[in-house]
Image (tube, rainbow, N blue to C red):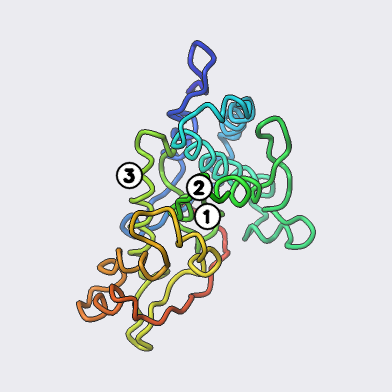
């Protein structure tokens, strides 16, 4: 069993306990572009998951503020993802989508079931109020890292995010997601860039944070070769001339049945 802290009581920034669970229960599919979680199996390791969540809850806000930006961001992404898994397990196997909890009453993203920094928090508090807080991290790639337990969401990574590899991990998450033609592609039938609704919901986040990128169009231009195999279509994308359309988001649970 992995310990959540060192012998000196310091927080384990390798997030080894969370990584162990992910490596054991996440199934990478579609050539590495997507993943599923074995919820039935991780439910058997619920004690280990709860122990990791408790280790996160023991971190004070003062200690957190003393960490590097990468340590903070890795902590927050992992906290979001681990608590999302815990939320699913509260009803599993009687759950087909996170929205089974409700949208007005019982909204899973607005339920303050999380213990963090000495107070109760919601998933939205972690993502929107903390990770996305303007002028703090300003990295739109986080949208390919936080996972909402849904098929339409960028994949749940098969390892924890860690500070010393964070940039490379975020970049790989982007390339995996953008290259998934079921969720992002250049549609030849309508000559339009068909992309995930994530790029509509969080369009403002792509206006700052990444060097040389100040819009969704510039973001897509950087990854044009992943969005289409056709040189002419890639050129249209790089020039920012592609019409942008959004594909329906699949909120079904990212559950691996086998």
In percent of width and height, residue 46 lies at 60, 35
User: Of label 3 and label 1, which has the lower sequence position?
Assistant: 3
Kindly identify which numbered label has been placed on residue 168. 3
Mark 2 vs mark 3, CA separation in Å: 26 Å
- Above or below: residue 30 compared with residue 75: below
The residue sitting at 51% across, 43% down in the picture is 77
User: Of label 2 and label 1, which has the lower sequence position?
Assistant: 2
Asked if the residue under mark 1 is in contact with the one under mark 2, i.e. CB atoms within 8 Å, the reply is: yes
- Above or below: residue 56 compared with residue 101: above
Residue furthest out toward the left: 231
Kindly identify which numbered label has been placed on residue 255. 1
Q: Is residue 224 left or right of residue 12?
A: left
> What crowding class fits label 1: few (fewer than 14 Cα within 10 Å), some (14-19), or many (20 or more)?
many
The residue sitting at 25% across, 75% down in the picture is 234
Q: Nearer the viewer, residue 198 or 18?
A: 198
In percent of width and height, residue 195 lies at 43, 72
In percent of width and height, residue 213 lies at 37, 61
Mark 3 vs mark 1, CA separation in Å: 26 Å
Provide the secondary structure element on which disc 2 rests: loop
Q: Nearer the viewer, mark 3 or mark 1?
A: 3
Mark 2 vs mark 1, CA separation in Å: 6 Å
- Above or below: residue 39 compared with residue 69: below
Read off the residue under disc 2.
38
Q: Nearer the viewer, residue 99 or 256?
A: 99
User: Of label 2 and label 3, which has the lower sequence position?
Assistant: 2
The residue sitting at 31% across, 70% down in the picture is 227
Q: Nearer the viewer, residue 64 or 30?
A: 64
């Amino acid at each position: 069993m992995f310990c959540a802290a060192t012998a000196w009581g310091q927080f384990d920034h390798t997030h080894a306990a969370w990584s162990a669970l992910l490596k054991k229960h996440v199934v990478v599919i579609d050539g590495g572009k997507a993943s599923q979680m074995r919820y039935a199996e991780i439910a058997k390791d619920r004690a280990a998951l709860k122990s990791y969540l408790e280790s996160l809850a023991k971190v004070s806000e003062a200690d957190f503020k003393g960490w590097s930006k990468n340590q903070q961001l890795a902590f927050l992404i992992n906290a979001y993802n681990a608590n999302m898994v815990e939320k699913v397990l509260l009803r599993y196997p009687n759950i087909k989508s996170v929205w089974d909890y409700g949208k007005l009453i019982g909204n899973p993203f607005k339920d303050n079931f999380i213990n963090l920094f000495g107070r109760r928090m919601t998933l939205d508090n972690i993502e929107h109020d903390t990770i996305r807080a303007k002028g703090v991290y300003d990295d739109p790639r986080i949208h390919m890292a936080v996972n909402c337990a849904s098929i339409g969401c960028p994949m749940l990574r098969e390892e924890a995010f860690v500070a010393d590899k964070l940039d490379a991990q975020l970049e790989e998450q982007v390339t995996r997601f953008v290259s998934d033609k079921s969720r992002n592609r250049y549609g030849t039938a309508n000559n339009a860039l068909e992309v995930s609704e994530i790029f509509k919901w969080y369009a403002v986040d792509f206006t700052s944070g990444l060097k040389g990128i100040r819009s969704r169009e510039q973001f897509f231009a950087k990854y044009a070769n992943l969005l289409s195999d056709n040189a002419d279509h890639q050129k249209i994308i790089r020039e920012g001339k592609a019409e942008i359309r959004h594909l329906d988001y699949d909120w079904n649970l990212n559950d691996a049945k086998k």
